[in-house]
Amino acid sequence: MTRERARAGTGPTRRDVLVATGVAGVAALAGCLGGDDAPEPVSLDDEQVCDECGMVIEHHPGPVGQAFYDEDLPEGRDGPAWFCSGTCTYTWVFGQEDRGHEPTIIYATDYSIVDWELSGEDGVTFISAHLEAENQVDVTDITMVVGSDVHGAMGEELIGFSDRDDAESFANEHGGELVTHDQVTRELIDSLGGM
């Protein structure tokens, strides 16, 4: 209530009440959608098959992903869609968005919290996979290096770090650009060269 209204003895206006109600509603909704109510990630080390490409996830290097939906997606499974790579994750998520399905939460490997290793095969450098649930974080909490000279299961990869300094160091050493989840587009995913 403004000082002038208080002196005049009038109460809050209809606009004041609507604004206060709207702010309270947004705050309550934000509390419901975030953090504690989000489903927890699962480990991907039990012969799960990538929902996008059909590869057995634990047989391949690089970041993995998973996406939860309120709907029965994937059909008949109680839990997330799971993926062998960041590129498969986003390809599937974009495809589901085309069908009107929005994910509740998307998880990806956080390379800031694991002891990752690089290995080479036929002149290509790969980053290690970390399949345990505790190594997967909300994609909105990471900075991803895209287009580096380090590959994952499907070739060029989105390699995520919860510590932006780690992402910058990785990009300085291995090339690539830094992006956040909001900057990942279909065009970006399509631009990544496969194996």
Image (cartoon, grey):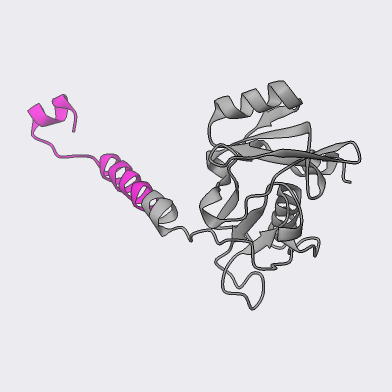
Residue 71 placed where, x, y %?
58, 70
Q: Residue sitting at 69 percent across and 55 percent down?
A: 93
Closer-to-camera residue (24/49): 49
The majority secondary structure of the magenta stretch comes to helix
* Residue 181 visible to an observer of this rendering: yes
Q: Residue sitting at 15 percent across and 25 percent down?
A: 4
Magenta stretch in the rendered image: 1-29
Closer-to-camera residue (99/130): 130
Q: Residue furthest right?
A: 122
Q: Residue sitting at 68 percent across and 39 percent down?
A: 117
Q: Residue sitting at 64 percent across and 40 percent down?
A: 116
Residue 70 placed where, x, y %?
54, 66
Q: Residue furthest top?
A: 172
Q: Quadrant of residue 77?
A: bottom right
Residue 57 placed where, x, y %?
72, 60
Residue 19, magenta (yes or no) = yes
Horizontal side of residue 168 vs 57, given as left or right = left
Quarter that holds the N terminus: top left
Residue 26, magenta (yes or no) = yes
Q: Quadrant of residue 183?
A: top right
